[in-house]
Image (tube, rainbow, N blue to C red):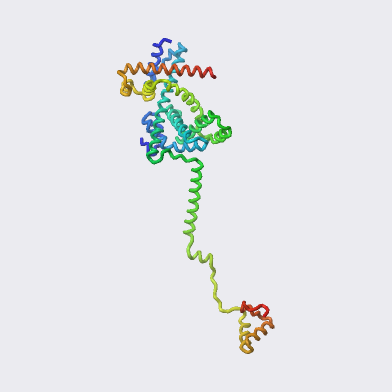
């Protein structure tokens, strides 16, 4: 193919790229398959140049980003694995639930509710056992002495002495 | 557009589509989403280096897709970036011929509701392969082509960036560089077809 034709095609390409509305060299493509093939190759070549230009820009941005990170005190961008992120999320959720429950417990607990939950009121009585039997025991004890009174009481099977005095031997 | 604060998705997409402050938009993507996407790649067996490389490719793909108007905004940018990253990483795993089990686990993690970006990624892989051809040219050629076709600078503006005598010299140089690259692409495509 003569060089002049190729140059004309390149001129057409440049004008088409500068002004997309300008007509593409359709007549070349229709009548000359070789020219049509060259036209496609030229378009692809321009695509490659653009691709390379873009790649250079992205590489420059990558370098700038790395520099920014280095200035910020990190030589490399902080990249956390998804597992680490999931673990952090789970830990945060546990902390949140624990915190919420502590807060709830703190608000719902008062001295009054605590007392009613764990203690029951009772009267401290001064009377123990059967009042009548105790009177009999005292009365007999005054008359005949405590050991005899105890023996008699046991005989009557009214009450065992160790009910009154837990340290009292059981065989008495 | 401030790269440090939160930016609505719509505003970011508009900035990319209109090629307005693209560099800041890219930096914003890095600041906002690199950690999330990197942790995702590392979760699926990638190293830190893998994660950074995949995110770089993800951003390139995202800007490309957004500029071409193929991003329909059916999902958030975060979801879309994750989807792109997944596909790139899956393809990378396939290339490395990792164990089937890992791929199965990875495949099962795909969200069906997400936009299918696998087709875009496959198209991009071809471009990525061809991109290496550009590095066969000398640096001045790469620069002149990038300034003209990516940055859309005029010959006069390019003259301010490069040490050439006048606009005509720049124009001739650009012709030669483009012809050189076109020849490389043509040969590479021919070889690819023959291999298939």
Give the residue at x 54% y 69%: A120
Say above or below: A148 vs B105. Answer: below
Quarter of the image holding residue A54?
Answer: top left
Say above or below: B108 vs B140. Answer: below
| Place of residue B92 in the rendered image (x, y in percent of width and height, measured from the top left) | 51, 30
Res. B154 in view: yes
Give the residue at x 42% y 25%: A52
- Foreground pick, A32 / B108: B108
Give the residue at x 67% y 82%: A154
In the image, is A85 to the left or to the right of B27? Answer: right
Give the residue at x 49% y 55%: A101
Quarter of the image holding residue B106?
Answer: top right
Count the numbered circles shown. 0
In the image, is B77 to the left or to the right of A165? Answer: left
Res. A20 in view: no
Residue most toward the front?
A75
Position of the N terminus of chain B by quadrant: top left
| Place of residue A147 in the rendered image (x, y in percent of width and height, measured from the top left) | 64, 85
| Place of residue B195 in the rendered image (x, y in percent of width and height, measured from the top left) | 54, 19
């Amino acid at each position: 193919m003569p060089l002049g034709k190729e140059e004309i095609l390149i001129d057409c390409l440049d004008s088409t790229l500068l002004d997309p509305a300008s007509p593409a060299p359709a007549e070349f493509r229709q009548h000359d398959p070789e020219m049509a093939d060259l036209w496609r190759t030229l378009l692809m070549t321009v695509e490659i140049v653009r691709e390379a230009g873009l790649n250079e820009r992205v590489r420059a941005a990558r370098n700038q980003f790395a520099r920014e990170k280095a200035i910020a005190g990190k030589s490399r961008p902080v990249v956390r694995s998804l597992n680490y992120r999931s673990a952090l999320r789970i830990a945060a959720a546990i902390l949140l639930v624990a915190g919420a429950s502590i807060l709830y417990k703190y608000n719902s607990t008062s001295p009054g509710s605590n007392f009613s939950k764990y203690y029951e009121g009772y009267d401290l009585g001064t009377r123990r056992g059967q009042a009548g039997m105790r009177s009999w025991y005292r009365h007999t004890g005054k008359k005949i002495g405590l050991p005899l009174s105890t023996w008699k009481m046991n005989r009557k099977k009214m009450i065992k002495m160790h009910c009154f005095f837990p340290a009292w031997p059981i065989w008495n | 557009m401030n790269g440090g604060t939160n930016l609505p998705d719509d505003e970011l997409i508009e900035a990319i589509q209109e090629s307005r402050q693209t560099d800041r938009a890219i930096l914003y993507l890095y600041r906002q989403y690199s950690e999330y996407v990197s942790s995702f790649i590392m979760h699926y067996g990638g190293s830190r280096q893998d994660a950074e490389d995949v995110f770089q490719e993800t951003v390139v793909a995202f800007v490309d897709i957004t500029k071409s108007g193929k991003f329909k905004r059916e999902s958030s940018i975060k979801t879309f970036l994750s989807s792109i990253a997944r596909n790139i990483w899956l393809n990378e795993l396939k290339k490395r011929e990792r164990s089937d089990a890992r791929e199965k686990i990875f495949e099962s993690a795909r969200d069906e509701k997400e936009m299918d970006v696998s087709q875009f990624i496959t198209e991009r892989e071809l471009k990525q392969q061809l991109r290496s051809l550009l590095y066969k040219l000398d640096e001045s050629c790469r620069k002149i082509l990038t300034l003209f076709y990516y940055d859309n600078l005029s010959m006069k503006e390019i003259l301010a960036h490069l040490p050439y005598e006048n606009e005509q010299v720049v124009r001739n140089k650009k012709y030669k560089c483009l012809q050189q690259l076109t020849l490389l692409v043509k040969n590479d495509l021919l070889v690819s077809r023959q291999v298939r």
